[in-house]
C-alpha cells in the first residue's frame, strides 16, 4: 500500500491528545455549526469559524491581511505555530480554514484525521472552557493566491482549454435535477447543472464512515481511474460555496501530491448565476 | 404567532452572538426525546430534505383543536437542533393555524440567520416549510375559508347557486374539478398543476368554484396563461357556471409538494 504524498500534514487524534499542552501547537476547531465548539471542544482548542471569522461580512471574499493577523494574534498563533484544524462534517470546514491559512502564507498547517466525530466517538474529552492565550505578533505572508484559488475568469479559460474540473457536489446537483432552493434564489442559483467537462466525484467518496480519509490507493483509484485525472494536470475543484471542494483540494494536493490544484470558491453559487457562461446538464 | 414562540424568538434576537449560541445549546439540550412510538419512524418521509443534518418532524392533532409537535435533530448540529427545539418549545400546543402561518422572518428576528450565514440557512427554511405543510394537513378548527370574500368576481352569485334545492342536484363533482385541473400543465415543467402541488384549495359555492393556486416561483412568466387555462378547464365541468382562480404566494411552493404525500394535502375544503 502506498503512502500519502505528504503524510506530515495529517495528524491522528492520538497525536493531538499528546500535544494538548504543547506551546508550539494550536488546535483550531472549524465547524459548519457555529454552536458545536461552544457545546464542547478539544481542551485548549480555539474556534475559527468560516462564516464568523474567515469571511468578510460585506464583500464575498476572505478577510483582509490586517483582520487575519488580528485573528491569529488573538488566538495565540505565531508564524511558527503548528496549527491543527479539525471540525464537523468530516473536516469540510477544517479543510476550508486550512486552505484560507495557506492563502495567507501560514507554513505549518495540519488536519486532524477523523475530525470532531472521531475524537468524540473515541470517548476523548470535550470541554466548554474557552481558552485565552497571550497575543502574538503574527505577520501574514500572503502567497500568490492564483496558485491555489481560481476565479470565474480562470475557470472560463480552463473550460475553453478543456482542462479537467472536479465537481464534488451530490450527483443530483451535478446533473441539474436538483437546484438548491428554487423558492429562495438568493441562496442558490438561477441555473442548474455543472461546468462543462467537469467530472462528478462527490466529496463523500474521499472519506470513510468514521470521518478519516481513504487510503492513498483508494483515493488514486477514485481520482485517477474513475475521474481520469493525471497527477500533473492543472485541476480546478468546485462545489456550491467552496467548502466541500476545499476537502478535495486538500486530498489532491497533500494526500496525492498533485502540484497544480486550485479551489474555485465562487463555485456553483457564482457559476450558476453568471450570464452567458456555458453549462451542461445530465450525467 | 404563538406568544411563547414570540418570546423565545425575541430573547434570542436581543442576545449577542455568544449568548445566542449558549441559548441555542440550552434549547438543544432540553429538546424532549421522541415518544417511543415515533422513534422508529425517523425515515425519509418524515425527514426535512433541504436540511443536510437529519431533522425529523411529526405534527399530530391533540385535544381542543391543538397540535402536538415532536422533533428530532442530531446533537452534533446544535444550532439546527436548538432551532428545532425552539419551534417545539414555542409551538407544541399551538393551533394548526398558528403553525400553518408560521412566518419566515423568525430566522431573522431570532438572529439565527446572522450566526449561520446566508449560505447555510436554507435547511432551516426547509424546516419551517415542512412544519407549515404538516399543520395545514390537519383539520382546521376555525375552518370557514375566507378566500371567496376577496376574490374579485364580475358576476354576482346566480340565483340557482344559492338555491339549495336546485344546486344539490347538479353541483360540480369535486373529482371532476380535480380532473379538469389535471389538464392544466405548467408549460415549462410539462406536469399538471395538481401533481405539481400548485393547487392549494378548491371550494364550491353552488355552481361557482373558487380555486387558490400558486406558481413554482413568483416570477413564473407562464402564470397568467396557466390561470386562464385553469378557469377555462373548470368552466367546462358539468355544473360549473363560473370559475374563479386566485393566485396566492403564501405559503410559497416548494418541490416537496410534488410528492404523493403532499398530494393528499390538497383536498377539497
Image (spheres, rainbow, N blue to C red):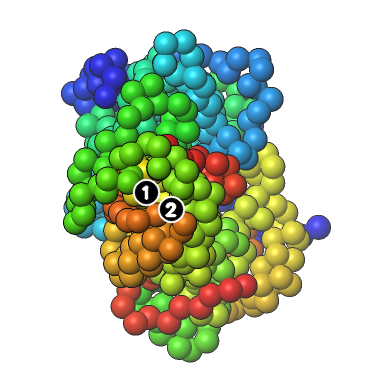
The picture places residue A32, in percent across and down from the top left corner, at: 44, 41
Q: Are marks 2 and 1 on the same chain?
A: yes
The picture places residue A93, in percent across and down from the top left corner, at: 46, 46
Whether residue A235 is situated above or below residue A73 in the rendered picture: below
Report the residue marked by disc 2: B239
Classify mark 1: helix, strand or loop: loop
Residue A270 appears anywhere in the view: no
Residue that appears at 48% across and 14% down: B62
Whether residue B26 is situated above or below residue A266 in the rendered picture: above
Of residue B70 and residue A145, the one placed in the foreground of this image is B70
Q: Which mark is residue B207?
A: 1
> Looking at the figure, which quarter contains the C terminus of chain B?
top left
The picture places residue B9, in percent across and down from the top left corner, at: 26, 24
The answer to whether B10 appears left or right of B252 in the picture is left
Circle 1 chain = B
Of residue B26 and residue A7, the one placed in the foreground of this image is B26
Asked if the residue at tag 1 contacts the one at tag 2, i.e. Cβ–Cβ closer than 8 Å, the answer is yes
Choose the circle earlier in sequence order: 2 or 1.
1
Residue that appears at 38% across and 80% down: A277
Q: Mark 1 Cα within 10 Å, few/some/many (few <14, many 20+)?
A: many
The answer to whether B148 appears left or right of B186 in the picture is left
Residue that appears at 55% across and 80% down: A197
Of residue B8 and residue B19, the one placed in the foreground of this image is B8
Q: Which mark is residue A125?
A: none
Residue B143 appears anywhere in the view: yes
Amino acid at each position: 500500500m502506498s503512502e500519502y504524498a505528504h503524510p506530515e500534514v495529517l495528524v491522528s487524534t492520538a497525536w493531538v491528545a499528546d500535544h494538548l499542552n504543547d506551546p508550539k501547537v494550536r488546535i483550531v476547531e472549524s465547524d459548519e455549526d457555529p454552536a458545536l465548539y461552544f457545546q464542547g471542544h478539544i481542551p485548549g482548542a480555539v474556534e475559527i469559524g468560516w462564516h464568523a471569522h474567515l469571511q468578510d461580512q460585506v464583500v464575498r471574499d476572505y478577510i483582509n491581511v490586517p483582520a487575519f493577523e488580528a485573528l491569529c494574534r488573538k488566538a495565540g498563533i505565531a508564524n511558527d505555530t503548528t496549527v491543527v484544524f479539525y471540525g464537523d462534517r468530516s473536516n469540510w470546514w477544517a479543510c476550508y480554514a486550512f486552505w484560507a491559512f495557506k492563502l495567507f502564507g501560514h507554513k505549518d498547517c495540519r488536519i486532524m484525521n477523523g475530525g470532531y466525530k472521531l475524537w468524540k466517538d473515541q470517548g476523548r474529552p470535550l470541554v466548554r472552557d474557552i481558552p485565552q492565550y497571550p497575543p502574538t505578533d503574527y505577520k501574514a505572508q500572503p502567497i500568490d493566491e492564483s496558485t491555489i484559488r481560481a476565479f470565474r475568469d480562470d475557470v472560463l479559460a480552463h473550460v475553453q482549454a478543456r482542462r479537467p474540473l472536479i465537481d464534488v457536489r451530490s450527483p443530483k446537483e451535478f446533473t441539474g435535477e436538483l437546484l438548491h432552493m428554487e423558492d429562495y434564489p438568493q441562496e442558490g442559483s438561477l441555473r442548474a447543472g455543472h461546468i462543462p467537462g467537469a467530472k462528478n466525484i462527490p466529496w463523500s467518496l474521499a472519506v470513510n464512515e468514521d470521518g478519516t480519509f481513504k487510503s492513498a490507493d483508494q483515493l488514486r483509484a477514485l481520482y485517477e481511474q474513475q475521474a481520469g485525472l493525471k497527477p500533473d494536470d492543472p485541476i480546478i475543484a468546485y462545489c456550491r460555496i467552496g467548502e466541500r471542494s476545499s476537502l478535495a483540494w486538500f486530498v489532491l494536493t497533500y494526500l496525492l501530491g498533485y502540484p497544480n490544484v486550485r479551489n474555485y470558491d465562487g463555485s456553483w453559487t457564482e457559476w450558476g448565476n453568471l450570464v452567458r457562461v456555458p453549462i451542461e446538464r445530465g450525467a | 404567532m404563538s406568544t411563547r414562540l414570540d418570546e423565545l424568538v425575541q430573547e434570542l434576537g436581543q442576545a449577542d452572538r455568544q449568548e445566542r449560541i449558549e441559548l441555542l445549546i440550552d434549547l438543544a439540550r432540553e429538546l424532549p426525546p421522541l415518544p417511543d412510538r415515533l422513534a422508529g419512524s425517523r425515515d425519509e418521509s418524515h425527514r426535512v430534505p433541504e436540511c443536510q443534518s437529519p431533522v425529523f418532524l411529526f405534527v399530530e392533532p391533540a385535544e381542543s383543536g391543538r397540535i402536538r409537535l415532536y422533533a428530532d435533530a442530531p446533537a452534533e448540529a446544535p444550532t439546527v437542533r436548538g432551532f428545532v427545539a425552539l419551534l417545539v418549545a414555542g409551538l407544541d400546543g399551538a393551533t394548526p393555524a398558528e403553525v400553518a402561518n408560521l412566518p419566515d422572518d423568525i430566522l431573522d428576528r431570532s438572529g439565527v440567520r446572522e450566526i449561520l450565514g446566508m449560505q447555510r440557512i436554507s435547511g432551516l427554511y426547509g424546516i419551517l416549510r415542512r412544519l407549515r405543510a404538516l399543520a395545514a394537513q390537519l383539520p382546521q378548527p376555525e375552518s370557514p375559508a375566507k378566500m371567496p370574500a376577496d376574490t374579485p368576481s364580475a358576476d354576482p352569485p346566480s340565483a340557482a347557486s344559492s338555491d339549495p334545492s336546485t344546486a344539490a342536484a347538479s353541483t360540480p363533482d369535486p373529482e371532476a374539478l380535480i380532473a379538469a385541473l389535471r389538464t392544466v400543465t405548467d408549460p415549462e415543467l410539462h406536469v399538471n398543476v395538481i401533481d405539481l402541488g400548485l393547487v392549494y384549495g378548491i371550494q364550491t359555492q353552488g355552481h361557482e368554484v373558487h380555486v387558490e393556486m400558486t406558481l413554482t416561483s413568483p416570477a413564473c412568466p407562464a402564470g397568467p396563461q396557466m390561470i386562464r387555462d385553469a378557469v377555462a378547464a373548470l368552466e367546462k365541468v358539468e355544473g360549473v357556471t363560473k370559475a374563479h382562480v386566485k393566485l396566492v404566494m403564501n405559503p410559497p411552493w416548494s418541490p416537496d409538494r410534488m410528492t404523493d404525500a403532499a398530494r393528499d394535502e390538497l383536498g377539497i375544503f
